[in-house]
Amino acid sequence: MLKSFIGTIGLMAVGATLAHAAEMHAVVRDHKGKVVADAVILAVPVDPRGALHARPPKDAVDQVDKQFVPYVKAIFVGSTVRFPNSDHIRHQVYSFSPAKKFELPLYSGTDAPPIVFDKPGVVVLGCNIHDWMIGYIYVSETPFFAKTGTLGTAVISDMPAGEYQVRIWHPNMDHAEETTSQQVTLTADASANAEWQIGLKPNIRVPRVSGAASPAYP
Amino acid sequence: MRCPSLRTFCKATRASLPALLIFCAVSHTARSDWTVATAGALSHDDNVSNARTYNDKVSDSSASATVSLLQLIPIGESYSLAAGGALSGQIYDTLSGLRNESIDGVVSLKKKWGLGAFATWARAGISLGRSDYQDGYRDATLYAASLELGKRIDERWNLWAKYAYERRAATPRDAEIYSVSSDAFSQRGRSFAANAEYTLSDRFSINLGSLLRHGDVVSTTQTAAAGYYLLLNSKAVAPDPTFGPGAYAYRLNGTTYGARLGAEYSLTAHSLIGCGFQRFETHAQGGNNYTDSMPELTWNYRF
């Protein structure tokens, strides 16, 4: 009885906070003014109590047509991620990244055990069988994040009013994400805009198709 | 009326069908990886006849196409088995007798030392094939065994080397010259190739290759004087009417040095076009030295 009473009070408190929630609209472009997809926008509350209500959700990164889908996945630290394999072949997913080192031995379907990402940072995914397969998981230390779509825009909603340090990350960004940081103030029931122009390195990847002379696969 | 491609295809299909069915059944249960690839090329060879003298050199352009089917079966963490085959054809602009169709099968075992795209790998493979030419005396069964070693240094640099032994077994006709073999189109050779690929941008890459080959080479000449000179050093001699009524082919021992420079552009994630230039210099027995230059345009698609 007492527990449900406390739970109800808690939910009311969260509801009251979200009732006055703000949102942030972000746009990312490159130096030529072209919109940038797959950029992760992170809003870190200056007052860390602003992130207390967050709970790590369950997420998934699929493998479709020998590619990771999505190419970039942003998750909250502590999240559990499954790696279902929608291809009719086996994949061997791994990461050497300091934020999470792991290996899923050859599997198909949904046989692979979920992985918990308990450290913030960038995790680069690969497949040991198909060298061109690459994907990114950005493990965010803040629950307020979003990823830009094909229009280069993203919206972070349900944010408590307050001060935020906002920054972005992209797999091909040619400078450190810390250099993109800017301060944004959100007021209740309002929205704020943030815009970035970033330099991108060429997206050099292991090619899926090579000329007749190249023997790397299979 | 003969139909070399159909005949070859039927023979090869009959021989390989049971093995293919067993292989498909095994691979299906192993959830292995089928790869279908197609390739096409337009090329020009300034010395198709492999001749030493200017008068004997015959140049021609050709178009070729290949369809290949390859099955990859990962075995554990470090090994993978690949097996498959290819059908290919080549037509020449003027030398119609060189038009050919080929079928071949290949089996290889690859080992990777470590996980990921940057792990060192090695592969041992064997292949068996059959080529049918418009001029049937060139028909041959092809055997090859190879050993490859490679490493991708980073996203830009990819290096690999290949050692191969190849044998081409043709059916000789009756000897025309007493005590000299007429088996001019059977060859054996060993080669070593070193290659590097450099990715310039997300779509452009260039590749460099070098080749050292030692073994049999076939030179064709129409000149009587050159023919006599070659006859003294050749292992086999046979008429070669592909290059004209009085032409003779001579099988000699030789060493070939080759180099290739190419560039490729990815049209999509599955396809690319490329251009390249190959140059070969052969030093054959008795001072029969010749060169070949081959510019080419290529197209590759992998499903």
Image (spheres, coloured by chain):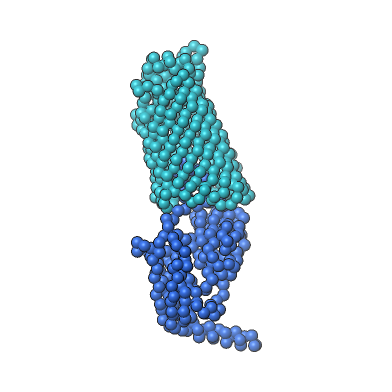
Chain colours: A blue, B cyan
Task: Choose between B215 and A119: the one closer to the eye.
Answer: A119
Q: Position of residue B110 (x, y in %)?
A: 58, 43
Of residue A62 and residue B229, the one placed in the foreground of this image is B229
Q: Is residue B215 left or right of residue B57?
A: right
Could you tell me residue B52's position as x and y percent?
A: 40, 23
Q: Is residue A99 visible?
A: yes
Pick the front one: A216 or A112:
A216
Question: Does residue A43 appear left or right of residue B276 in this picture?
Answer: right
Residue reaching furthest to the top: B178
Q: Position of residue A88 (x, y in %)?
A: 55, 54
B191 up-or-down from A170: above or below: above
User: In the picture shown, does residue B302 fall above or below A149?
Assistant: above
Q: Residue at x 45, y 62 (%)?
A: A175
Residue A193 vertical placement versus B158 (above, below): below
Residue plotted at (48% across, 17% down): B233
Total number of numbered discs in the rendering = 0
Return the x and y of residue B197 as percentages of the image width and height.
46, 44
| Residue positioned most to the front | A179
Question: Residue placed at 45% from the left, 33% from the top?
Answer: B258
